[in-house]
Amino acid sequence: MKKVSLKDIATEAGVSTALVSYVLTNKDKKARIGEEMAKKIREIARKLNYQPNHIARSLKSGRSFTIGLIVADISNPFFANIARTIEDEAKKHNYNVIFGSSDENVDKSQDLINVLVNRQVDGLIITPTEGSEQQIRQLQEQKIPFVLIDRFFPEIAASYIAVNNRESAAGAVSHLIKAGRKRIGMVAYKTTLHHISERIGGYQDALQQHGIKATNSLLKKARYSHLKEDIRLAIDELLKGKHPADAIFFATNSLAIEGLKYINTLGIRIPDELAVITFDEGEALDLFYAPVTFVRQPILEIGKAAVRVLLEQILDGTTTTTAICIDTTLVVRKSCGSR
């Protein structure tokens, strides 16, 4: 079967091959091609099942038209939704996305970077793992375009897309205090990553602002590699004694989901006996008998901004640093209650 060419589409549309090329590479607006004509050309291309020649395109442009995406954990709904958003946004610019999951492992992160760079991706979007600073510096030395998402390293001047973690966490904990909770515990990951440190800082800020003494006994940390056992131990410690916690702020949705499963087995009623709030959303939180209050991160905005900033670097041939911090929204539901 003969491969459909730009000339075949141009002949049927009654226009030049150059005009068809402009439309199919999404340059129709720049070339001031009318919407009706652009729509007609795209419909003809679909009808004829036109498949672009990516190899010829790459040779001509010097680019592969692929982006490498490395997330921390693709099984986490937050990262799965981010990946989908980035894939959809990249497609609008005729870019494909190759992605992998580092599983919060610095060695696996390095392996993925090596594989993607060897595949000659035009740039990378990365959720950095703990201890991956040298990997980021190496990308800078190699002048490979990249953007960090969700996390960044304050000591490294690199482009990133993140949210206002400290302010968001402070707002969430303040909501618990205003709902009458006085002994608020927090469960976070045991890590030096900046975004978790900021969420812990926001938790402590809120307690201080409301005249509540922050104590180490109410701040618990869980290892990513021992999540289930560490969460159980953390909750047991928060709920024991004469003055147990009356609320828990989970630093991420994965911590919240694992924590809620254990809280449920203990027969503790939410929000009557214990209020719960978490950073990040997840469908599992909707299914809990007391829908969980959460800090919503603007996934669509994060994904779109990451692709835009990365493509600006790729197309301009520069490594200009762009730092974007996006506001979150607190979604209040039943799990916080009031007293």
Image: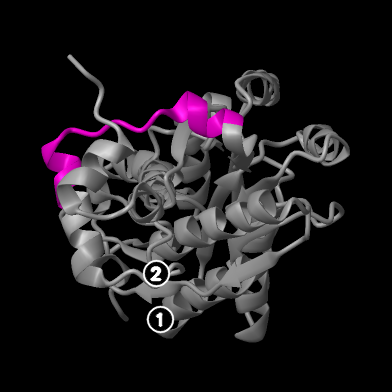
CA neighbours of label 1 inside 10 A, class few (<14), some (14 to 19), many (20+)? some
Q: For the residue labelled by badge 2, is the local secondary structure a helix, a strand or a loop?
A: loop
Residue 46 lies in the magenta-colored region: yes
Q: Which residue lies furthest to the left in this view?
A: 47
| Dot 1 amino acid type | Gly
Figure coloring: one colour
Quarter of the image that includes the C terminus? bottom left
Q: Which residues lie in the magenta part?
A: 43-59
- Residue 72: x and y in percent read 54, 36
- Residue 120: x and y in percent read 63, 26
Give the residue number, with chain letter if any, for mark 1: 180
Relative to 199, 316 lies left or right = right
Residue 300 lies in the magenta-colored region: no
Count every numbered label the image shows and give the total.
Answer: 2
Q: Main secondary structure of the magenta part?
A: helix
Relative to 144, 248 lies left or right = left
Q: For the residue labelled by badge 1, is the local secondary structure a helix, a strand or a loop?
A: loop
- Nearest the viewer among 78 and 207 is 78
Relative to 278, 9 lies left or right = left
Q: Residue at x 46, y 60 (%)?
A: 304
The label on residue 258 is: none
CA neighbours of label 2 inside 10 A, class few (<14), some (14 to 19), many (20+)? few
One can see residue 332 in this view? yes
Give the residue number, with chain letter if any, for mark 2: 29
- Residue 338: x and y in percent read 30, 79
Q: Which residue is drawn at 46% across and 36% down?
A: 97
Q: Residue at x 64, y 68 (%)?
A: 324
Residue 118 placement: quadrant? top right
| Dot 2 amino acid type | Lys
